[in-house]
Amino acid sequence: MRLRNVPGAREEMIANKFVINEPAENKGRWRDVFGNDNPLHIEIGTGKGRFITELAKQNPDINYIGIEKFSSVLIRAVEKQEELELPNLYFLRFDAEDIEEIFEKDEVDRIYLNFSDPWPKDRHAKRRLTSRRFLARYKNFLKQSGYVAFKTDNKSLFDFSLEEIENAGWILSDVTYDLHNSPYNEGNIMTEYEERFSEMGNPICRLVARY
Ligand code: SAM
C-alpha cells in the first residue's frame, strides 16, 4: 500500500477516544471496554475502515475492533467513527505480528482479513497474514466455533493461503475465485481495495477457514 504521510496522524491517534493505545492492558478484558458480553469480531489490516465500520453499523449486537499498523491510513477510519460514534467499534494502531499479546484464549469470535499485503518474496512468506505462523497465533485466541474470512484479488496469495490452511489442519469452506458472481456474495460488504480492484476487472477470491 502506498502511504501518504498525514501530518499529526500519530498524535491524533494517541488522543482519540476510539483508539485504544495500550491494547495489551485489555487482554482478556475486552468485554469491559465495550461494556457487554457480545461476540467480538476483528479485522486485521483494516486500512481506511469502510468494511468494519459498515459491519458495526449493521450489527449493533456484535463488537468490532479494526487493527491497522499505520496511523496515516487508520486516521481515515477514525475520522468516520468520530462522526458516527458507534458504541461497538474501536480501533488499534498495532502490528499484528504481536497479536497474541492483546487477545486471550477464546476471546475472539471471528477474524476478517481483507486484501492483506501479499509479501510476494518467498523469504517474506511468514509475514503473510494467512501463513501457518499467523494461523497458529489465531488459534490461541479465536474460539473453536469461530472462523477466519479472507478476501483478496491476488490469486498467488489466495492459492498460498489455501495450501497453508490445509497444511495447518484447518477446515476450508465457502471457497470461491469469483466472489461477486458466487452465492457467497449475498450480504458482501466491499472494502476500499475490493471496489478498486473489481472496477479494474479483477475477480475477487474469498475463503472461510476454521480449525
Ligand atoms: N483491508 C483494507 C481494504 O481491503 O481496503 C486495506 C487493504 S491494504 C492492501 C492492507 C492493509 O493492511 C494496509 O493498510 C496495511 O498497513 C495493513 N497491514 C498489513 N500488515 C499488517 C499488520 N501486520 N498489522 C496490522 N496491519 C497490517
Image: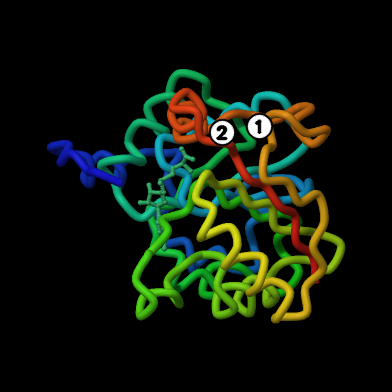
Question: Which residue type carries mark 1?
Answer: Leu
In the rendered view, does 53 fall on the left or right side of 19?
A: right
Q: Residue at x 63, y 57 (%)?
A: 30
Residue 28 percent across, percent down from the top left: 65, 68
The yes-or-no answer for disc 2 within 8 Å of ligand 1 is yes
In the rendered view, does 162 fall on the left or right side of 144?
A: left
Contact (Cβ within 8 Å) of mark 2 with mark 1: yes
* Corner quadrant of residue 185: top right
Residue 201 percent across, percent down from the top left: 50, 28
Q: Let me know if residue 81 appears in the view.
A: no
In the rendered view, does 127 fall on the left or right side of 26?
A: left
Q: Residue at x 65, y 25 (%)?
A: 57
In the rendered view, does 84 fall on the left or right side of 16?
A: right
Q: Nearer the viewer, residue 102 or 157?
A: 157
Question: Which residue type carries mark 2?
Answer: Phe
The residue beneath circle 2 is 51
The residue beneath circle 1 is 55
Q: Nearer the viewer, residue 61 or 178?
A: 178
Q: Residue at x 65, y 45 (%)?
A: 34
* Corner quadrant of residue 173: bottom right
Residue 20 percent across, percent down from the top left: 44, 51
- Residue found at the far top of this picture: 83
The vertical placement of 147 against 39, above or below, is: below
Neighbor class of circle 1 (other Cα within 10 Å; few <14, some 14-19, many 20+) is: some
Q: Let me know if residue 113 appears in the view.
A: yes
Dot 2: element: helix
User: According to the image, what is the colour scheme of the structure?
Assistant: rainbow
